[in-house]
Image: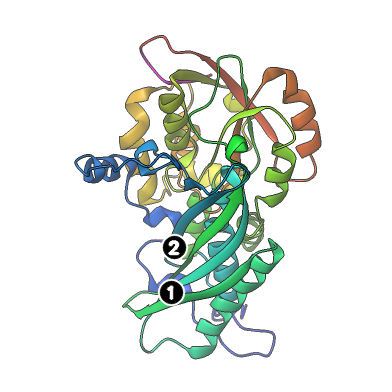
């Protein structure tokens, strides 16, 4: 970065477009709110197929269709406006985020199709670098990009439609959590707040570098470890924030969750920013959707805001059998960005779905 102008440069000295300046929203913070989305889908007729194991009616991370007794395909799609100024990094994050839904279902990504929107006058090398970042992240996952579709738009957007495979008997959904399960999470919270601050020039270089590193990290290792244990439910925490995605898990499973907020890894700089009121618009949408189902107790407001903060390429949230929790947590430590034991699944008492402590 040129310290005098704040302009990002490539290693050859060529100036890059600051991508986040080209979009109103960033990353998964651009996601339509969960409540609005549910109302848009509520009158749409759902067709039944005995081989459709998971459909859109279940508010899950991806759809799953059974091919035979040994194989089911997992399909998902995700794209969004830039969350990083550097095109290559943006491409990496978008790819990691798109594949994450397959990992959350217990599957392995195999094929991907690019989805891209670019302004007509956007620098060609910047577009190339976005695609290069996506390709290299997909290849890191052991998958292939086999094509895609692009259109012209006023704002750049990038993502992928991803197809993966999973054994029909080993699918993980967000609706299988059981009373007594422990909740384990694999990435820190606060990425939406810090990237929002960065867009306004209010984040430190060190803080931004850290969250970009977290967002480019695949959930592959977390998935590969997770499937060895008795995990009853899983979801990746992205645009709806920890509270929004946990609410979907508890509602779908017919349970409640008690959350130990002291056990959650909150990015220090993000928490300080939240205390000053620097928050993404998506946080307010998430709070509006989920807050009525959350007993916030005596938890301070800034910490609450972090729990509603929209994440991009966030971690896997797992509900694991208590007998396996120690072993799973122990194997995850040091191999994922931040292994955390954040709470337990309890019986639903008819009131709040999530209790913060």
In the depicted view, which residue is nearer to us: 114 or 203?
114
Picture residue at 33% right of the left edge, 40% below the top: 48
Give the alpha-carbon distance from disc 1 to disc 2, as whole Å.
8 Å
- Secondary structure beneath disc 1? strand
Q: Is residue 285 magenta?
A: no
Q: Main secondary structure of the magenta part?
A: loop
Which stretch did the figure color magenta? Answer: 351-355
Confirm whether the magenta stretch covers residue 353: yes
Q: Quadrant of the N terminus?
A: bottom right
| Residue matched to label 2 | 79
Q: At 54% across and 88% down in the image, what residue appears?
A: 125
Does dot 2 land on a helix, a strand or a loop? Answer: strand
Residue under pointer 1:
116
Q: Residue at 32% across / 43% down in the picture?
A: 285
| Residue for point 45% across, 33% down | 243
Quick check: 85 left or right of 152?
A: right
If you read the primary sequence from the N terminus, does the residue marked by circle 1 or circle 2 appear first?
Answer: 2
Q: Nearer the viewer, residue 198 or 218?
A: 218
Dot 2, crowdedness within 10 Å: few (<14), some or many (≥20)?
many
Residue 154 percent coordinates (x, y): 31, 77
């Amino acid at each position: 970065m040129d310290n005098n102008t704040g302009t990002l440069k490539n290693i050859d000295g060529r100036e890059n477009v600051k991508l986040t300046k080209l979009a109103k929203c960033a990353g998964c913070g651009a996601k339509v709110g969960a409540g609005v989305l549910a109302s848009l889908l509520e009158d749409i007729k759902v067709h039944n197929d005995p081989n459709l194991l998971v459909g859109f009616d279940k508010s899950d991370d991806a759809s799953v269709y059974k091919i035979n007794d040994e194989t089911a395909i997992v399909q998902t799609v995700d794209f969004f406006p830039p969350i990083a100024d550097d095109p290559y990094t943006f491409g990496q994050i978008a790819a990691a985020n798109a594949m994450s839904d397959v990992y959350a279902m217990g599957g392995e990504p195999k094929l991907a199709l690019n989805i891209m929107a670019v302004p007509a006058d956007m620098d060609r090398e910047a577009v190339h670098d976005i695609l290069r970042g996506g390709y290299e992240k997909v290849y890191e996952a052991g998958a292939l990009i086999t094509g895609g579709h692009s259109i012209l738009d006023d704002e750049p957007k990038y993502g992928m439609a991803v197809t993966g495979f999973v054994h029909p008997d080993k699918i993980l959904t967000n609706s299988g959590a059981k009373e007594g399960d422990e909740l384990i999470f694999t990435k820190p919270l606060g990425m939406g707040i810090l990237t929002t601050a960065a867009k306004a020039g209010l984040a430190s270089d060190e803080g931004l570098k850290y969250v970009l590193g977290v967002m480019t990290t695949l959930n592959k290792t977390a998935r590969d470890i997770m499937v060895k244990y008795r995990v009853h439910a899983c979801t990746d925490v992205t645009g709806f924030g920890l509270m929004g995605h946990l609410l979907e898990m508890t509602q779908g499973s017919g349970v409640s969750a008690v959350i130990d907020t002291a056990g959650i890894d909150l990015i220090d700089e993000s928490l300080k920013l939240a205390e000053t009121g620097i928050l993404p618009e998506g946080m307010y949408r998430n709070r509006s959707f989920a807050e009525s189902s959350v007993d916030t107790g005596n938890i301070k407001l800034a910490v609450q805001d972090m729990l509603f903060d929209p994440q991009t390429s966030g971690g896997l949230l797992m509900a694991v059998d208590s007998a396996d929790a120690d072993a799973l947590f122990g194997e995850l430590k040091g191999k994922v960005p931040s292994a955390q034991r954040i709470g337990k699944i309890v019986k639903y008492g008819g009131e709040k779905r999530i209790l913060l402590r």
